[in-house]
Image (spheres, grey):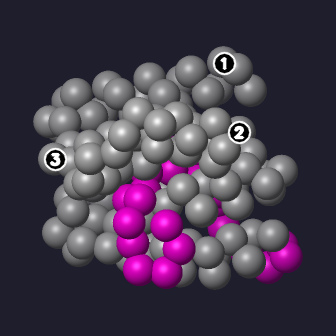
């Protein structure tokens, strides 16, 4: 199972990618929002032939495109419209900002950094993935 990670901070990106592998998932890794956007171009024009993610974990504030902008675009693609999307941020978001990202951009969950501990994060992400599978 492939899970996408998009995070501009190398230490966090590496740690999350390693956790995904420990949990038995193949990480699809991007270092900024523009790299994900460019990958989505390939998905959309069908020039990408690799596995599509079954869960997405992205930072909100990255160079290039923001996580919520990418989530919004993913929701417009038939091949990714049901993929659960979790955003993470080190910044405090108002309830209104969170609600807007969930309602307008198709974000399933927003996590605040520092992220939960290893086991709590594993449980949270797997529950989000499982819930998306049952509603798809």
**Residue pictured at 52% horizontal, 35% vertical:** 99
Residue 84 x, y percent position in the rendering:
57, 39
Magenta stretch encompasses residue 29: no
From the image, tell me which residue sits under label 2: 82
Answer yes or no: do the residues labelled 1 and 3 have beta carbons within 8 Å?
no
Q: Is residue 12 above or below residue 41?
A: above
Q: Is residue 30 visible?
A: yes
Question: Where does the magenta region start and end?
Answer: 45-66
Residue at x 70%, y 60% (from the top left corner): 73
Q: Residues within 10 Å of mark 2 (few under 14, many from 20)?
A: some
Please identify, in this view, whether the residue under mark 1 or under mark 2 is nearer the observer. Answer: 2
Residue closer to the observer: 130 or 41: 41
According to the picture, the residue beneath numbered tag 1 turns out to be: 134
* Residue closer to the observer: 98 or 62: 98
Quarter of the rendering containing residue 90: bottom left
Quick check: can you spot residue 24?
no
């Amino acid at each position: 199972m492939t899970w996408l990670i998009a995070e501009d901070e190398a230490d966090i990106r590496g740690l999350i990618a390693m956790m995904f592998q420990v949990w038995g998932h193949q990480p699809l890794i991007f270092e900024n929002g523009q790299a994900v956007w460019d990958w989505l171009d390939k998905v959309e024009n069908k020039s990408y032939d690799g596995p599509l993610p079954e869960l997405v974990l992205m930072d909100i504030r990255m160079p290039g495109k923001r996580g919520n902008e990418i989530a919004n675009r993913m929701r417009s693609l038939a091949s990714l419209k049901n993929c659960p999307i979790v955003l993470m941020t080190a910044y405090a978001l108002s309830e209104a900002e969170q609600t807007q990202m969930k309602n307008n951009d198709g974000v399933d969950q927003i996590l605040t950094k520092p992220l939960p501990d290893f086991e709590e994060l594993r449980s949270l992400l797997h529950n989000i993935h499982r819930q998306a599978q049952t509603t798809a």
